[in-house]
Image: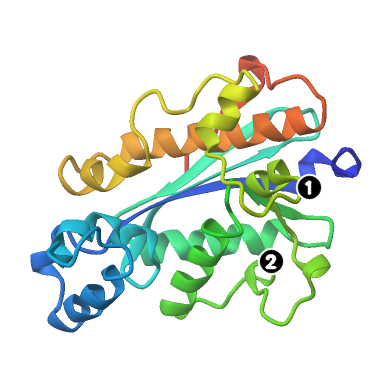
Amino acid sequence: MLENIQLSNILFLDIETVPQYPTFEQVPDNFKQLWEKKSQTFRMSVEESPDHNYNRAGIYAEFGKVICISCGIFSKDEVFRLTSFASHDELKILREFAEVLENFCTSPQKLLCAHNGKEFDFPFLSRRMVIHGIPLPEVLNTPGKKPWEVNHLDTMELWKFGDYKSYTTLNLLAAVFGIPTPKDDIDGSQVGEVYWKENDLDRIRKYCEKDVLTIAQIMRKFRGEKLIAESDIEFVTQ
């Protein structure tokens, strides 16, 4: 069925998130206690302190924030255009991206696509928008919808082919398909350090855009199509 979808109807995206504070010591006391309870579920031992795992706070919408959203679309002439929203101001990013979604997702044929998007990107964005009081764009407003009414594609889910226990990273799937790896600089575990210690948003933006390009390339592979040529990739500055 993927071959029946027009690629120009898909918005490919990836997000980068970090803990809301540089260190555990700077977390407000009430959230320190809440993080201590949350982190009990994945601590390696009872002796391990809550601050030891605080770098993982960025993957939870209650304790993290969005610092970059990269997205890409195919034009009618098959040029793949990439753009990013990157800022220290999460509210600004989310408002701008919500507007993009409202303008793009104007019909049931319009879809969002991310790798592991159904488990991470889409719910994370939705939760952070709700926290900030931003009205959810219809494409993210999924509560109460039937599964076939949710216009989300997920390349990791597509690769499962019904295998619920399978988890495949974007990097592994790219290698399997012979797609140049997007992990040639940093990986997701390093984003928090690059953000809080190096203050290098531009480096994070480039990393995020590479992931979006890889997701689009994987979709082409699923459809039995050739990869996007470098000459057909265009970066649009916000």
Q: Residue at x 48, y 64 (%)?
A: 124
Question: Image check: 6 left or right of 165?
Answer: right
> Dot 1: what SS?
helix
At label 2, the amino acid type is Val
Disc 1 residue type (three-letter): Asn
Q: CA distance from mark 1 to mark 2?
A: 13 Å
Circle 1 is placed at which residue position? 9
Query: Residue 226, image x and y in percent?
Result: 76, 19
| Residue 61 coordinates in the image, percent (x, y) | 40, 68
Q: Which SS class for mark 2?
A: helix
Callout 1 environment at 10 Å: few (<14), some (14 to 19), or many (20+)?
A: some
Quadrant of residue 149 within the rendered picture: bottom right
Please identify the residue farthest to the left as the structure is shown. 25
The residue at 26%/48% (across/down) is 192
The N terminus lies in quadrant: top right
On the picture, is 187 further left or further right than 171? left
**In the depicted view, which residue is nearer to us: 186 or 86?**
186
